[in-house]
Each structure stands twice: as C-alpha cells, then as structure tokens.
Image (tube, grey):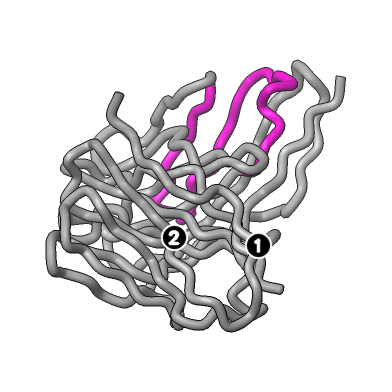
Amino acid sequence: EADIYQTPRYLVIGTGKKITLECSQTMGHDKMYWYQQDPGMELHLIHYSYGVNSTEKGDLSSESTVSRIRTEHFPLTLESARPSHTSQYLCASSGGHAEAFFGQGTRLTVV
Amino acid sequence: AQSVTQLGSHVSVSEGALVLLRCNYSSSVPPYLFWYVQYPNQGLQLLLKYTTGATLVKGINGFEAEFKKSETSFHLTKPSAHMSDAAEYFCAVSRAGGTSYGKLTFGQGTILTVHP
C-alpha cells in the first residue's frame, strides 16, 4: 500500500544531541515537505524539495537541515537539539495533485 | 502572501446536530483550498479540496464545503455530527499551479467536540 512513513513516532532526547527524523514515501511523489506544529498552533512549512538534490527553506525559519538523495527519502537533521526544538514534525509529499499527503508525525521533546 | 483565519478555536455540538466550521482566507491569486482533519497523535488526513470548477465540494465522512469568492470563505459543514467526528480540523490555502502543490498555509485549527 502506497504511504508515507515517519520514524520515530516519539523521541525524547537530551540537549546538545544530534538527531535525524526519518521520512519515506512509497507513492512515487517528486515533491516532499516538512511542517512544524507546536501544541495548539497551526502548521508551518520549514523545508521542501521538488526532487533529488533539490531543497529549499520554507516560510518558518528553522535550525534544522534536510537532504534529498533519493526520491523516496527526505530526512530532517538537528545538529544540536535544544528545548526550543520541542515540537511535532510532520512530513508530507505531493505528486500530480494539489493536496499534500501527511505522515503520522514525530513528536520531539528535548530535555 | 496568503493567510487563513479559522473563526473559533473550539466548537461544541450535540450528536446529530449540524457541524459548521468557519474558514476565511486571504490570497492575492486564485487559491486552492483544503480542509484536513487531525485525530490525536496522528497526522493530517485530507477531507476535501477546492481547485477549480464546482464551488460546492463534497468530501469524505459526509463533509462538504463551499468556496465563496466574494466572501473569501470556505466553510466546512456536515448535516449531522457523529461522535467519531471529534477531532481538530485545519483549513489550508495554497497557490494554484504545479510548483505550489503541497506548499500549504494553515489556519490555527478548530477543535470539534461532539456531545452525546
């Protein structure tokens, strides 16, 4: 079944640690996105990619970085996690349609 | 620039009652409009979308929305609420065109509570 997967679903990590949030999709979509969602708030686009080796920053400034080496894979990395990075991170993809398809999210807590 | 305003962060209805969630948008270009639903600890699921054509769009689970350009609105309705409709609902807008696919601007969300 075509889908979009995020791992881990939950992550609690100490300040200063390097973390990578994984996102993979099996829908063959060329466009992929990362959104950040703080509790009780709207989602904000932080990164997007139109294809392999293409990455752009979104509307909300983020200290995270992304890479797109394979079409199906779009990981997000924080080199040194801080409590201000505590949030939910949602990965999405889009093909030939206007809508985005979302993964189940990674809830990150930095202590 | 685009923006979305959802009127009412919390809406409470009785089971069987009409559901009305309000969304107004601002866009300098013809918009694409979406409603997504989010259940606790889950991602977002698309309920319905408007791109072009008929302004009344029907979605999953009995929901529908009407695009009203003159009012810059895209309100979500369902004639009869069910307990399983309790969730958070997000209205979103994007620009028309392939390069804008998936680049969404979201509203603040509306939490729908359904009472027995």
Q: Is residue B75 magenta?
A: yes
Q: Nearer the viewer, residue A65 or B86?
A: A65
Q: Which structural element holds mark 2?
A: strand
Label 1 CA crowd tier, 10 Å (few <14, some 14–19, many 20+): few
Q: Is residue A56 above or below residue B102?
A: below
Q: Quadrant of residue A45?
A: bottom left
Q: Is residue A94 above or below residue B37?
A: below
Q: Is residue A77 above or below residue A103?
A: below
Residue A72 in the image: state x and y as whole percent: 22, 48
Q: Residue at x 40, y 31 (%)?
A: B56
Question: Which residue is under mark 2?
Answer: A21
Q: Is residue B69 magenta?
A: yes
Q: Residue at x 32, y 77 (%)?
A: A57
Residue A86 in the image: state x and y as whole percent: 63, 70
Chain name for mark 1: A
Q: Quadrant of residue B50?
A: top left
Question: Which residue is under mark 1?
Answer: A12
Image side of residue B116 versus residue A89, left or right: right
Q: Nearer the viewer, residue B10 or A56?
A: A56
Q: Is residue A50 above or below residue B111?
A: below
Chain name for mark 2: A
Quadrant into which the C terminus of chain A falls: bottom right
Q: Nearer the viewer, residue A30 or B103?
A: A30
Residue A41 in the image: state x and y as whole percent: 64, 63
Q: Amino acid at mark 1?
A: Val
Using the rendered image, report if marks 2 and 1 lie on a common chain.
yes
Span colored in magenta? B62-88
Q: Residue at x 48, y 75 (%)?
A: A18
Q: Amino acid at mark 2?
A: Leu
